[in-house]
Image (cartoon, rainbow, N blue to C red):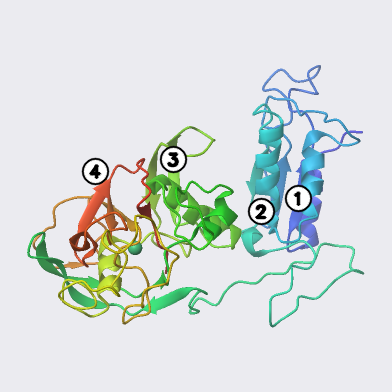
Amino acid sequence: MAFSVQTLLDNLNDSGNELNMIVLDACRDNPFGWSRSGSRGLSVVGRAPAGSIIMYATSANSTAADGTGRNGLFTSQLLNNIKNQSLSIRDVFDKTGEDVLSVSGGKQHPELSLRFFGASSAYLGARPAPAVQPAPVAQQTPAPVLTVQPAPASAVPSGFVRINGGTFTMGDSASGQRRVSVSSFNVSRYEVTQKEYQEIMGVNPSNFKGDNLPVERVSWFDAVEYCNKRSRREGLTPAYTITGRTPTTEYPITFATVTWNRNADGYRLPTEAEWEYSCRAGTTTAYNTGSSISGNTGWYKANSGSSTKPVGQKPANAWGLHDMHGNVWEWCWDWYEAYPNTAQTDPTGAVSGVNRLMRGGSWFHSAENTASAARNSSNPNGRGSDNGFCLVRP
Ligand SMILES: [Ca+2]
């Protein structure tokens, strides 16, 4: 039986539903070849109404695999993911696309047309209950129940510390100093751990293994991708747009153009200025514990035993942040460049460059390299066992 998808959409549009989801599991290599002479197969629906999600099992001009069971490959994967109530609607479709692409050996590329902008924070059925407010179970309602749970904009995310904006003297006598003002932001209390990284990325590249050790051997591209994936997982707007990437679909990314959407509410790396402001926590000395290093200041070459340490073992700085001195270097957003001499507000570094900044020193480096103003940089594709990152949320 054939019918017009557009007619269906128009009817749904008139019905006033909050969300219409349509899944088209069909080949798109011209099922109407006898009557059409133009492009092959089902075309993209032209008038998808606001509040609709349309997923095509395969991209234009290609066929959909039949699979081995009762359902085609696409439908099988979709049904698997729909059962997972921890996935948002957006995640269900994203994961189905990734699964179909993977199982088909890269031959079948599903496409997603999204005109419902709450899909990352909406769930089919009841989401697993949050601690204090169980979600209602809607077994008798035939239509999918939307559970939209946006976080209050003013809330400090779990595991983060609110940093109030201010002005400080950035740098030291070696690198030059200038007055820098930064706006308020939230920063993670610890370096990103291997457990946190594994949960989002599905891999753990670290040399020293342990759930509560900082993740290391992560490139700058890995860190950026982690930020975006975690943002999508939690219904936030990803901070970064990644284009021109190599390889085109697989991981890890070895080259890409990355732009930062400063209005996004998702996870991101600190700027170099935000990192130093956070590390100093109001201090003006070489270390946030004073003018010389002490055993309680951080993990560096002389006290680390030649490995990373679980995050948070050394005392926090005055603003509640751990491991700002040592353990692993922390990637920052900025391209490396010599400092300008003039005062700046919310600087973001050079427009382009070769290396990205790292801050804070590591288990492998001397005490001086862990100082509040010490700088290091690496190619964004570089990865070392002394090299991790922390997170910022607006
Ligand atoms: Ca560190």
Is residue 241 or residue 295 the one in the foreground?
Answer: 295
Q: Residue at x 79, y 66 (%)?
A: 145
What residue would you read off at disc 2? 91
Point out the tag, 4 or 1, that comes first from the N-terminus.
1
How far is mark 4 from mark 3, CA to CA?
17 Å
How far is mark 2 from mark 1, CA to CA?
9 Å
Do tag 3 and tag 1 residues touch (Cβ < 8 Å)?
A: no
Do tag 2 and tag 1 residues touch (Cβ < 8 Å)?
A: yes
**Kind of residue indicated by mark 3:** Thr
Q: Residue furthest front?
A: 305
How far is mark 4 from mark 1, CA to CA?
41 Å
Which mark's residue is nearer the viewer, 3 or 1? 1
Do tag 4 and tag 3 residues touch (Cβ < 8 Å)?
A: no
> Which quadrant of the figure has residue 363?
bottom left
Q: Is residue 45 above or below residue 360?
A: above
Point out the tag, 2 or 1, that comes first from the N-terminus.
1
**Kind of residue indicated by mark 1:** Asn
Is residue 309 or residue 346 the one in the foreground?
Answer: 309
The dot on residue 221 is: none
Point out the tag, 4 or 2, that comes first from the N-terminus.
2
Badge 4 element: loop
Categorize mark 1 by other alpha carbons within 10 Å: few (<14), some (14-19), many (20+): many
What residue would you read off at disc 3? 243
Badge 2 element: helix
How far is mark 4 from mark 2, CA to CA?
34 Å
Badge 1 element: helix
The dot on residue 353 is: 4
What residue would you read off at disc 1? 81
**Kind of residue indicated by mark 4:** Gly
How far is mark 3 from mark 1, CA to CA?
27 Å
Q: Residue at x 54, y 35 (%)?
A: 249
Point out the tag, 4 or 3, that comes first from the N-terminus.
3
